[in-house]
Amino acid sequence: MYDLVIKNGTIIDGTGSPGYVADVAVSGGKIVRISKGIDGERVIDAKGLIVSPGFIDSHSHADDAMFEYPDMIEKTEQGITTSIAGQCGISLAPAAEGMNIVNGFGNSRDIFSSFGEMARAVRSLPMGANIMSFVGHGSIRKAVIGYDNRKPTEDEMSAMKALLCDAMENGAVGLSFGLVYTPSCYADINELIELARVVKSYNGVISAHIRSEAFALVEAVEELLEVVKTVGVKAVLSHHKAMYKSNWGKVGRTLKMIDEAVNEGYDVYCDVYPYTASHTTLVSTVIPPEMRAMDSSGIIGLVSDRAMRRRIKEKYTEIYGPDLGYIQIAHCPGYPAYDGLMLDEIAKQRGQDPFDAVFDIIRDSQGDVYICKFVMCEEDVEAVIKHDRAMICTDSSVVKDEAVYHPRLRGSFPRAFRRYVRERKAVSLEEMVRKCTSMPASVYGLSSKGVLKEGYDADICIFDADRITDKADYSDCRQRCEGLEYVIVGGGIAAQNAVYTGSKNGGFIKGHQ
Ligand SMILES: [Zn+2]
């Protein structure tokens, strides 16, 4: 007898092949049989519904899930059965004592001096879904050099490599760069190349939040591709986009650059979340990296000084223009009343110049301010999503409190199907499933996931292709999706009608084993 039989569904197996009607039998956490006429005691009737592999969140900041929020509610309730965390240069480990661990993406009570130590601690923790993690270049650099804006010494480079080797040996999927965030942004290309060589020697992956997603976007992609071509390492360009109006359309060029690299034999991908607003920190948006050469206490001094305020404003205006009207405060623990408000509105309320309002808010909140930035265009988002090396992601953490966040927290995957398959008809249903399943599985070496096939893990989504819809928006990011009937993790039902069941069949997965 089987543990569970999913009957009469249309199977879209994740490979891009056309759907077909069959039954799926699950036992011991695995898909054991796919054929017609399978019977069992415990049956889900999936007639008229799509049965696909569980979604793999190719770019996630769910690092906190490992110790703080193991339910992974926001993930399972939108169909995500595996998340790839530790992105943008920021991982839970290594972390030096007394330092803000997941800089910009929340904190953890646990401090691990190496990825290996963390991997051992998380190894047997049951979780609502699966998680695999990069080791963050920023985390490694911070542990060795702190926030110094300089090249590493030879000894420091050896210490960074030792931490990287430890991570790769203990299940890190690869090394992530966050080249707009301190201190990852202080690395020159030689440092990236030297560390990428170590990753390559373990057959790992590099991912990069590149140095610019705006005015120097093309140059930033060139830098990443130079690392790829020098080292031959597999790479993922993180949350690919072009920010600010004068840069819209540049993704046409950068996607061609990816195509050219692929044609030359290099293994390059990108990930994308299906929204025109990004989510980031107010500090990294307003203060240029060269003036940010410090930890949060340094930032407070910077924005408290009148002359520095003037310089930051001048520098910002020179690059981006005088407008801050595209910024929405998403989450600001220091001023919870501002959550969800546009910055212009806040400045008006305070009777202040918008820049002074920004500096005061950063100062009073110790730099702990998250924003949504409405700076992309629909055409670019769609062009990236359509690209045959683009994977869908949330770029989202799990949420810590009642904060306003970004609708991608709960909406990314359902939105990809609603908007780009059903409404825009930009991508076929089978191809969208592939972007959410087998493509990330193959990029990240998840050899038993991402495809509905006998012998594979029973991570499964059952949804109505005509109804699957994101409900979360910028005023309420917590709304659950609709049309996603079942999410199965390791053979157990993790969410039903987008409500988490409390099941904990997931856990930490080691990469490259
Ligand atoms: Zn990023």
Image: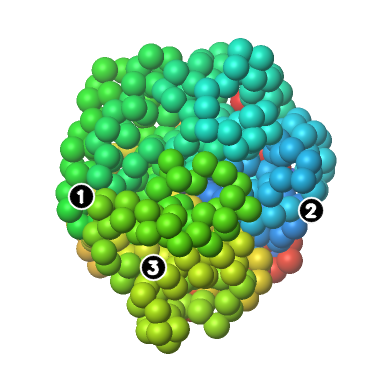
* Number of residue marks: 3
Relative to the observer, which residue lies in front, 290 or 438?
290
Other-residue count near label 2 (Cα within 10 Å), few / some / many at <14 / 14–19 / ≥20: few
Residue type at tag 3: Phe
Quarter holding residue 271: top left
Callout 3 secondary element: helix
Residue sitting at 25 percent across and 45 percent down? 215
Q: Give residue 284's mark.
A: none
In this orientation, does residue 347 appear? Answer: yes
Three-letter amino acid code at the position of disc 1: Asn
Name the image quarter holding the C terminus: top right
Near mark 3 (Cα within 10 A), the count class, few <14, some 14-19 or many ≥20, is many
Q: Position of residue 469 (x, y in %)?
A: 40, 71
Q: Earlier in the sequence, mark 1 or mark 2?
A: 2
To which residue does mark 2 refer?
A: 109
Mark 2 lies on a secondary structure that is: loop
Determine if residue 392 is in view: no
Instruction: Determine whether 21 is above or below 178 in the image.
Output: below
- The earlier-in-sequence mark between 3 and 1 is 1
Dot 1: element: helix
Q: Position of residue 238 (x, y in %)?
A: 42, 42
Q: Position of residue 371 (x, y in %)?
A: 46, 65
Q: Residues within 10 Å of mark 1 (few under 14, many from 20)?
A: some
Q: From the image, tell me which residue sits under label 1.
A: 247
Up-down: is 188 above or below 395? above
Amino acid at pointer 2: Arg
Residue shown at 49%/21% (left/top)?
Answer: 191
Instruction: Return the residue at label 3.
Output: 355
**Mark 3 vs 2, N-terminal side:** 2
Q: Residue at x 58, y 33 (%)?
A: 148
